[in-house]
Image (spheres, helix red, strand yellow):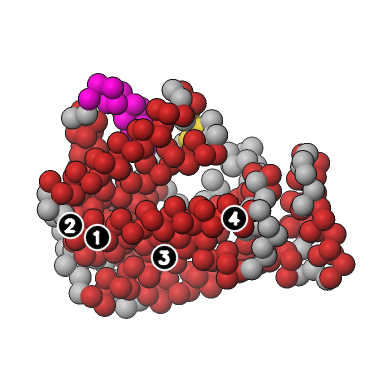
């Protein structure tokens, strides 16, 4: 599926969004404007603004608050990525050298702080206090999710419920408020806003589970490196499903293998093969299938429209993507 099929009905909305982002870069001091230009050029798929516009168009044409919502979520998302890249010592982001690698860690952290402040200023200058109230709790949840995952990586925590709690916070929280913001600015009623907030949370869970799957079956062809989660001791759904399918002796051996430090490439490859053999990948896809059914049930409560059709295509795209 071409991504253009998903965004075809909101191209003008996305053009407006890009112009607003560029205005922010142009309106910034020379000390940061060049860095922002560099960041905004590597724009990726813009999934979060797309969700704002599509959920808005379920109910109305976008208004100024809709555009503000799209920019707010993107500024905050980008700020968290800058900080994440410093924590992870990442060298690449969206195929380009990261800010921390091209400049330095301090520049990346301060640029992230600047984007958070810009988001706050955009909201307050335009009296978007309700939007700010909707969006900012997600940033707290996102940070909490990252901290929860760090704590999990220090122990062999194989709980599926704990895993879901982490991914709801670190990934699904911001995607959920994108949908909630779009519905709110589109004039949806409270029930519809809650419905789309739930849709966004489930979509965010699907997004993260697929990311976790790709860490085990990506390849050079897909551009997704494998084994990063293993090296960082992140117990994700493929491992949890693998554990469930093992006998006690197999679990003992797997845990010993997992806790081995340092992990060389041969050990990582062995863990990947074990996960695939014990249906860790297929088990994870089964969870995605269940979540997708819930997503479609939620959307079935809304009238048919181009925006609804695009949301279904986006759901399929996220599940089928290879990077």
Name the disc covering residue 133, or none: 1
- Percent across and percent down for residue 294 are 45, 74
The residue to which callout 4 is attached is 151
Circle 2 is placed at which residue position? 129
* Numbered disc 1: secondary structure: helix
- The answer to whether residue 255 is seen in the rendering is yes
Magenta stretch in the rendered image: 29-43
**Mark 2 to mark 4 CA distance (whole Å):** 34 Å
| Mark closer to the observer (2, 4) | 4
Q: Position of residue 175 (x, y in %)?
A: 38, 58
Labels 1, 3: front one: 1
Magenta stretch: dominant SS? Answer: helix
For residue 140, side relative to residue 232 (left or right): left
Please identify the quarter of the rendering in which residue 19 is found. Answer: top left
Q: Give me the C-alpha separation between circle 1 and circle 2.
A: 6 Å
Upstream in the sequence, badge 4 or badge 3?
Answer: 4
Gap between marks 2 and 3 measured at Cα? 22 Å
Q: What residue is shown with label 3?
A: 201
Which is more N-terminal, label 3 or label 2? 2
Say few, some or many: other residues with alpha carbon within 10 Å of mark 4 (under 14 / 14 to 19 / 20 or more): few
Residue located 44% across and 39% down the image? 83
**Mark earlier in primary sequence (1, 3):** 1
Kindly report the distance in space between the C-alpha atoms of the residues bearing marks 1 and 3: 17 Å
Relative height, residue 33 to residue 168 (above, below):
above
Query: Is the C-beta separation of discs 1 and 2 under 8 Å?
Result: yes
Mark sitting earlier along the chain (4/1): 1
């Amino acid at each position: 599926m071409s991504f253009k099929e998903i965004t075809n009905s909101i191209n003008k909305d996305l053009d407006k969004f890009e112009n607003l982002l560029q205005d922010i870069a142009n309106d910034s001091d020379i000390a940061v404007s060049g860095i922002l230009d560099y960041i905004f050029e590597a724009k990726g798929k813009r999934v979060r603004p797309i969700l704002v516009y599509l959920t808005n168009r379920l109910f109305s044409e976008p208004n100024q608050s809709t555009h503000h919502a799209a920019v707010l979520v993107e500024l905050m998302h980008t700020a968290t990525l800058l900080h994440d890249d410093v924590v992870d010592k990442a060298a690449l982001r969206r195929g380009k050298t990261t800010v921390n690698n091209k400049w330095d860690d301090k520049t990346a952290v301060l640029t992230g702080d600047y984007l958070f402040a810009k988001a706050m200023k955009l909201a307050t200058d335009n009296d978007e206090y309700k939007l700010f109230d909707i969006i900012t709790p997600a940033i707290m949840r996102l940070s909490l999710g990252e901290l929860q995952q760090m704590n999990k990586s220090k122990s062999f925590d194989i709980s599926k419920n704990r895993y879901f709690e982490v991914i709801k916070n670190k990934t699904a929280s911001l995607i959920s408020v994108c949908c909630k913001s779009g519905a709110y600015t589109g004039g949806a009623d409270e029930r519809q806003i809650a419905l789309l907030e739930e849709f966004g949370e489930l979509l965010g869970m699907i997004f993260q589970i697929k990311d976790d799957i790709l860490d085990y079956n990506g390849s050079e062809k897909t551009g997704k490196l494998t084994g990063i989660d293993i090296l960082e001791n992140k117990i994700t759904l493929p491992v949890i499903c693998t554990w469930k399918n093992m006998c006690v002796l197999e679990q003992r051996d797997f845990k010993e293998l997992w806790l081995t430090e340092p992990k060389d490439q041969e050990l990582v490859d062995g863990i990947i093969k074990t996960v695939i053999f014990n249906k860790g990948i297929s088990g994870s896809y089964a969870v995605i299938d269940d979540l997708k059914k819930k997503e479609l049930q939620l959307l079935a409560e809304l009238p048919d429209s181009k925006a609804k059709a695009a949301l279904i295509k986006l759901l399929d795209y996220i599940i089928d993507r290879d990077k």
